[in-house]
Image (spheres, helix red, strand yellow):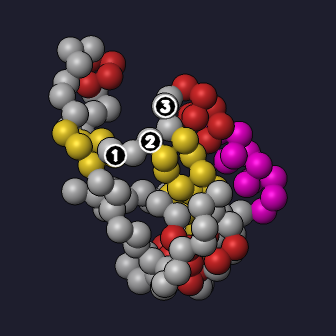
């Protein structure tokens, strides 16, 4: 696991991206956005506090956020392991003080909805 990141939690610096061209395969091109991460290493975490999200994440407010329990984290790790096995991604879990710096942060909200943001360019 990479060394713990320093600084305030919140939106991470977007990863470097590169242009990706259509493949000619409709099943693949349908999920392409024209950009992809330049690195195949992606960090994820299971924040234990709404503060790990920083400002700009309204669903992660202290009133709405709750961390995933151990069984939910294990289920997410299982899914991420499948993603890793089907792709060239290297998914790295950040824990402890680094969990607020991961590119993907997985938690629960009381709103019954999920959100994802592409903060890249």
Category of crowding for the residue at label 1, using alpha-carbon neighbours closer than 10 angstroms: few (below 14), some (14–19), many (at least 20): some
Asked if disc 2 and disc 1 are in contact, CB closer than 8 Å, the reply is yes
User: Compared with residue 28, is residue 121 higher up or lower down, i.e. above or below?
Assistant: below
- What residue does disc 1 label? 37
The residue most toward the top is 25
Res 14 visible:
yes
Question: At 18% across and 28% down in the image, what residue appears?
Answer: 21
- What residue does disc 3 label? 88
Quick check: 89 left or right of 118?
Answer: right
Residue 47, by quadrant, is: bottom right
Res 45 visible:
no
Between the residue at mark 2 and the residue at mark 1, the CA separation in whole angstroms equals 7 Å
In the rendered structure, which disc, 3 or 2, sits on the residue that comes first in sequence?
Answer: 2
> Within the magenta stretch, is there residue 3?
no
- What residue does disc 2 label? 40
Which quadrant is home to the C terminus? Answer: bottom left
Residue 108, by quadrant, is: bottom right
**Closer-to-camera residue (43/34):** 43
x, y percent for residue 98: 60, 72
Give the magenta range: 69-79
User: Compared with residue 98, is residue 62 higher up or lower down, i.e. above or below?
Assistant: below
Quick check: 95 left or right of 43?
Answer: right
């Amino acid at each position: 696991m990479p060394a713990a990141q320093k600084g305030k939690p919140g939106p991470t610096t977007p990863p470097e991206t590169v242009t990706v061209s259509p493949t000619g395969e409709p099943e693949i091109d349908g999920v392409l956005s024209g950009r992809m991460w330049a690195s195949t290493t992606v960090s994820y975490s299971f924040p234990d506090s709404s503060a790990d999200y920083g400002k700009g994440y309204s669903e992660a407010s202290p009133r709405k956020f709750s961390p995933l329990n151990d069984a939910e984290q294990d289920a997410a790790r299982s899914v991420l392991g499948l993603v890793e096995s089907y792709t060239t991604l290297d998914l790295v879990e950040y824990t402890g003080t680094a969990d607020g710096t991961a590119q993907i942060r997985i938690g629960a909200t009381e709103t019954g909805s999920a959100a994802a943001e592409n903060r890249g360019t």
